[in-house]
Amino acid sequence: MGRVYNFSAGPAVLPEEVLRQAAAEMLDYDGTGMSVMEMSHRSKPFAGIIETAEADLRELLQIPENYQVLFLQGGATQQFAAIPMNLMRNKVADYIVSGSWSKKAFKEAKLYGDARCVASSEDENFSYVPDVDAIEFSPDADYVYICQNETIYGTRYPKLPDTGDVPLVTDVSSMFLSEPMDVSKFGIVYGGVQKNIGPAGVTIVIVRDDLVREDVLPFTPSIMRYTTQVKAKSLSNTPPAYGIYVCGLVFKWLKEQGGLTAMKAKNEEKAAILYDYLDQSALFKATARKSDRSIMNVPFVTGSDELDALFVAEAKSHNIESIKGHRSVGGMRASIYNAMPKAGVEALVAYMAEFEKAHA
Amino acid sequence: MGRVYNFSAGPAVLPEEVLRQAAAEMLDYDGTGMSVMEMSHRSKPFAGIIETAEADLRELLQIPENYQVLFLQGGATQQFAAIPMNLMRNKVADYIVSGSWSKKAFKEAKLYGDARCVASSEDENFSYVPDVDAIEFSPDADYVYICQNETIYGTRYPKLPDTGDVPLVTDVSSMFLSEPMDVSKFGIVYGGVQKNIGPAGVTIVIVRDDLVREDVLPFTPSIMRYTTQVKAKSLSNTPPAYGIYVCGLVFKWLKEQGGLTAMKAKNEEKAAILYDYLDQSALFKATARKSDRSIMNVPFVTGSDELDALFVAEAKSHNIESIKGHRSVGGMRASIYNAMPKAGVEALVAYMAEFEKAHA
């Protein structure tokens, strides 16, 4: 069969051009006679791959000089532990809990010190982002933590908290490279790549120099220490080399698309097609508060479990895949990452309209 | 250009048939209209991939029922921390230090308790394996740790230590699936896959049920707890899905080759071609003690740094790649894993003979 429109929340759709190039180079990368999977991570060709990937990422995100870029393993979940292990000197950290991922990060941080939930939107099933202006942060906090786009609930921070001199740490997994961002506002910007950038198994951590310190919690595993990884340029042990290569291909693709300003425009256009339909629909309803809506993950419901199930079941015949919502919200969820073409969103909306007409 | 003979120690050569299949399925896995890279790890197609991979691995290694199979991230290096974190109840562990990798594991374990070096071969640059019968193990040790095949020095345990009731933990990264092994002799068998099985970024941990316990060291990150991963069947967070898929293709390939008994015969035949040449050569000399030689990694030297450098430099024109030795040993190293064809070893020996003749 042909390619489907894949609305999976992650791992998720990748640009078809990138997949075609990866397939074409599988047995012989750039005349080396080897697959990237087979190359020593200390070899010149691989050095070229990872250095180019970092340079392209720096260009795309306009990463300031005083930030290090690391390509790590373990997913965002591993960073849930690594962040407190590396940053908790006062053993205090403030967490804003706006969904499942920040809640998990908060819970993990409690293993390492006094992690404080300074605001939560759990009272309304995480359908909104807490008002950051109403939060009193701990003056002795080592950092303030947020998950800037909650994949499951489809919310995104409309405004960042002002944390003064306390470093702000942001998990951007499900919005990574979907739009420009000012890295200098953060102590750490990080995310798993498997939503918007590449194959699962690579975590990108962008960390400000002053947070790369030797005085980590004493039991921090060597490879989870930012010092280790910064010194070794992510090669303290064998990195997830093939995944980094695919990320690099996606960075090139993003540059060809016009960079992050162009991506933002495309993503907003795609999201508007879907939200505009939802806002006028008599059947379907978006679940996130309008002011806090994500342009990457769009959960919606009909209000009837039976109709939701029917919509999901019949999606396949419309070439639409992985549209089922997460059990925490129910209904449907359309993840419309960078690599989802506008035609995919249009196909979804056309199916929704057809479904609504049939079940009016 | 065509494919080269790639003697890299890892990441390393993969079966050409496997790479061809991965390339062919890159845009559409098994009629799903998606790449394996794009699939939700909770989807049915991916469940099929990981479950089949586990079943095939269990069949290949004849893994007993009371062992769990985990597909994790972070490499062997991450397990250097995870093993003491999960197993150190008495906070005592015995390490046999027979090379760089067991030495690194030993050093990391000291972060977590009283790790004791009970035997070492560092006195002769790790060119042999300590006599396991001469070791006095600590009666209160939580486990005894070995690296069964030291990649850099080209040694392999000719005999396993008898540790009685104390669990034996073995790092088999550079000999994984190169021959049958009796898993029941071990508490944990583990290794990174990037040498003999698949692309970097997947670590396979085979752990006996009684070592999967809740009472780990309290600061153990959730995803490094074996309990977490066993309960979630390696899916507690997004796994390195594409890497697991390629490992699964290699498992199928190994079964087609006749399984591990057949692989052992092929590997011994390849190793014998190289060692027989080395043992009669007036120029080249294998560096590991004969009784402890690895059949996977074969370091050798000429005795002259200039000739070593010349041999490495001219190898490329003989279609031979990544033959340079590790700086700890110098000279050359041929890693002749499962996927290295006999023709590759023959080509290497032919080049060695030609070189020896020219520089006699």
Image: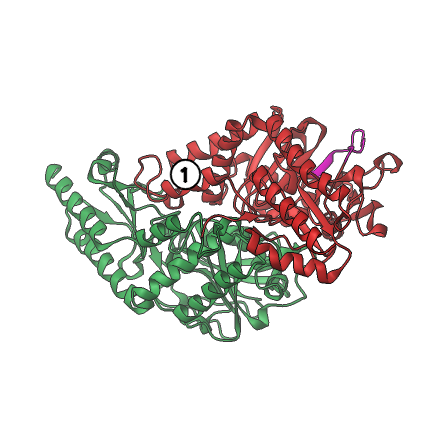
Chain colours: A green, B red
Give the residue at x 67% y 35%. B188
Amino acid on which disc 1 is placed: Gln
In terms of secondary structure, what is the magenta stretch mainly? loop
Give the residue at x 79% y 40%. B290
Please identify the quadrant where the N terminus of chain A is shown: top left
Membership of B165 in magenta stretch: yes
- SS category of the residue bearing label 1: helix
Q: Position of residue B13 (x, y in %)?
A: 54, 45
Give the residue at x 42% y 31%. B48
Q: Quadrant of residue B340?
A: top right
The residue stretch that appears in magenta: B158-170
Of residue A65 and residue A36, the one placed in the foreground of this image is: A36
Give the residue at x 26% y 58%. A290
Label 1: few (<14), some (14–19) or many (≥20) C-alpha neighbours in 10 Å: some
Q: Position of residue A23 (x, y in %)?
A: 38, 48
Number of disc labels? 1
Q: Position of residue A343 (x, y in %)?
A: 20, 52
Q: Position of residue B331 (x, y in %)?
A: 71, 55
What chain letter is assigned to the residue under label 1? B
Please identify the quadrant where the C terminus of chain A is shown: top left
Q: Which residue is mark 1?
A: B21
Q: Is residue A113 visible?
A: no
Of residue A162 and residue A8, the one placed in the foreground of this image is: A8
Q: Is residue B192 above or below residue A50?
A: above
Q: Is residue B33 left or right of residue B218?
A: left
